[in-house]
Image (cartoon, helix red, strand yellow):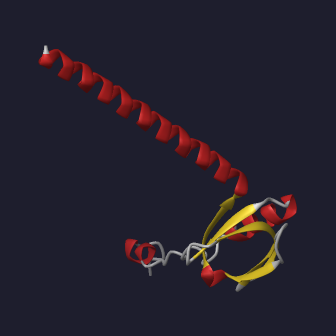
Amino acid sequence: MMRNSARNVGERKKTPPPAETRAEIYYYKKQIDAHTQMVIVLQDGEEIEGTIEWYDKEALKINRKDAPNIMLLRHNIKYMYKAEEREKLKSAKTEAQETKAEAKEAKETKETKKNSKKAE
């Protein structure tokens, strides 16, 4: 009887990856401990800003500065990000819009010069 035959080695089943990596748990814990201001975007597009006080499988409790604290059911959350990233996104968007406007203006100036030369 051969124990290490090719047939026996091929029959070994690989263990499936874990159902949960705990990355989400680590992320929530890190944000709770640091009292990080978060923006939570709900499925309907509404944005809630505050710090995460606690979480469980079904919900997050958010502490807000200028509004009552709120408990959000997790299935209503589309995504979330740090509030400080919103400022970075806004400034990047503004820069992109300014660059686009400058390019449009340069193109219009170039076309105007080109048209004035044709008129002569």
- Tell me: residue 73, above or below residue 115: below
Give coordinates of residue 97: x percent, y percent: 48, 41
Q: Residue at x 72, y 51 (%)?
A: 84
Q: Residue furthest front?
A: 120
Q: Quadrant of residue 48?
A: bottom right
Q: Residue 47 versus residue 33: which sits nearer the camera? A: 47
Horizontal side, residue 22 vs residue 34: left or right: left
Q: Quadrant of residue 64?
A: bottom right
Q: Residue at x 61, y 83 (%)?
A: 75
Give coordinates of residue 93: x percent, y percent: 53, 45
- Quadrant of the drawing holding the N terminus: bottom left
Q: Residue at x 56, y 77 (%)?
A: 43
Q: Residue at x 47, y 72 (%)?
A: 4
- Tell me: residue 9, above or below residue 95: below
Q: Quadrant of residue 36?
A: bottom right
- Quadrant of the drawing holding the C terminus: top left
